Image (cartoon, grey):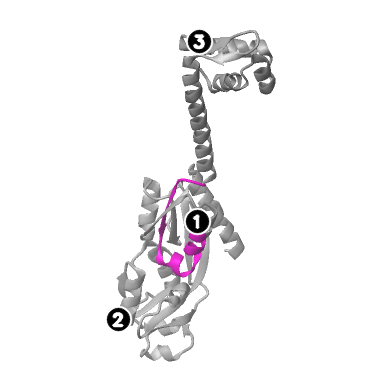
């Protein structure tokens, strides 16, 4: 029994005539009669009572008509459900993000755009550090990551795409002597205690560039694992924090931000995903995110 036989049977049942049903189905009548007979043989009984003028359903045929319609409706539903999933209209996208993704507006723009285009797809977001995002994507617990640029070599199973690049700003208490300046040059940081992120991208990218700018080892006073941790330490007067420019949108009492004059010091936001990603919803999200990157010229 196959779906074609069910369609043939329903056409005959509706038309109550093999000739009209065959014409409707665009097949010859003998082929239609053969398919209905094969269906009856498989079921082990008659579905139709045939006369010279018309065809009538047997009691079993009336029951089979109901079930055949139900089966075809279910098959069509299954087809449409799978096609929608393949197009990304349904399914789940699990997104990891770091502070930069939120404060730059990139994450919200992508989430908003995806939800508007695919309102029936589920979005699940998790705030987590860069390395945790990488491990979660490789382990299958996460689909997409928005992480600070990672200087180390990534797994060949990952795709890393630059989603944004920003200069650094210096966060400091409003009463600090450098707060009177409109901009901060790197030499002014030579003897200042600095507060940095405790993250691989800091060790791999920022610190080497900072050493090159200063000409010596910077004075690292504290490291913090989170954005609020870094800013809280700076606002407490425990050092000057070097943070990506989007973080200047975070208002904390007695904390001010000043641009850092150092073109070689930049913070990247990276879009992370799997090389062999097959999820329809995930790939739809990635397409929208990549289109956003192109429009921003990142």
Residue underneath mark 3: 46
* Tag 1 secondary structure: helix
* Tag 3 secondary structure: loop
157, 36: nearer the viewer: 36
The mark lying in front, picked from 1 and 3, is: 3
* Tag 2 secondary structure: loop
Left or right for 46, reference 29: left
Q: Within 10 angstroms of label 3, few (less than 14), some, or many (20 or more) residues?
A: some
Say whether disc 1 or disc 3 marks the residue closer to the N-terminus: 3
Residue 8 appears in the picture as rendered: yes
Q: Residue 219 placed where, x, y %?
A: 34, 77
Rendered position, 146 above or below 173: above
Say whether disc 2 or disc 1 marks the residue closer to the N-terminus: 1
> Label 1 to label 3, Cα distance in Å?
52 Å
8, 251: nearer the viewer: 8
The mark lying in front, picked from 2 and 1, is: 1
The mark lying in front, picked from 2 and 3, is: 3
Chain part drawn in magenta = 89-112
| Residue visible at 61% across and 18% down in the picture | 16
> Label 2 to label 3, Cα distance in Å?
89 Å
132, 3: nearer the viewer: 3
Residue underneath mark 1: 115
Residue underneath mark 2: 238
187, 265: nearer the viewer: 265
């Amino acid at each position: 029994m196959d779906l074609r036989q069910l369609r043939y049977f329903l056409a005959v049942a509706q038309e109550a005539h093999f000739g009209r049903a065959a014409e409707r189905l665009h097949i010859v009548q003998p082929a239609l009669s053969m398919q209905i007979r094969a269906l009856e043989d498989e079921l082990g009984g008659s579905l139709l009572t045939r006369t010279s003028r018309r065809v009538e359903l047997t009691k079993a045929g009336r029951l089979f008509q109901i079930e055949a319609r139900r089966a075809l409706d279910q098959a069509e539903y299954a087809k449409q459900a799978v096609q929608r999933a393949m197009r990304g209209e349904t399914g789940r996208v699990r997104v990891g993000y770091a502070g930069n993704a939120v404060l730059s507006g990139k994450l919200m723009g992508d989430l908003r755009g995806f939800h508007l285009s695919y309102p029936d797809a589920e979005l699940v977001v998790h705030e987590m550090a860069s390395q945790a995002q990488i491990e979660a994507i490789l382990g299958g617990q996460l689909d997409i990551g928005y992480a600070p640029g990672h200087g180390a070599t990534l797994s060949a199973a990952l795709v890393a795409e630059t989603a944004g690049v920003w200069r650094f700003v210096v966060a400091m208490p409003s009463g600090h002597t450098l707060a009177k300046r409109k901009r901060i040059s790197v030499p002014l940081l030579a003897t200042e205690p600095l507060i940095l992120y405790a993250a691989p991208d800091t060790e791999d990218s920022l610190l080497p560039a900072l050493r090159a700018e200063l000409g010596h080892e910077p004075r690292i006073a504290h490291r913090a694992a989170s954005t609020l941790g870094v800013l809280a330490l700076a606002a407490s007067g425990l050092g000057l924090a070097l943070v990506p420019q989007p973080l200047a949108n975070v208002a904390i009492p007695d904390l001010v931000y000043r641009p850092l004059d150092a073109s070689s010091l930049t913070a990247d936001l990276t879009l992370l995903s799997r090389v062999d990603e097959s999820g329809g919803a995930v790939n739809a999200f990635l397409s929208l995110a990549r289109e956003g990157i192109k429009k921003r010229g990142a």
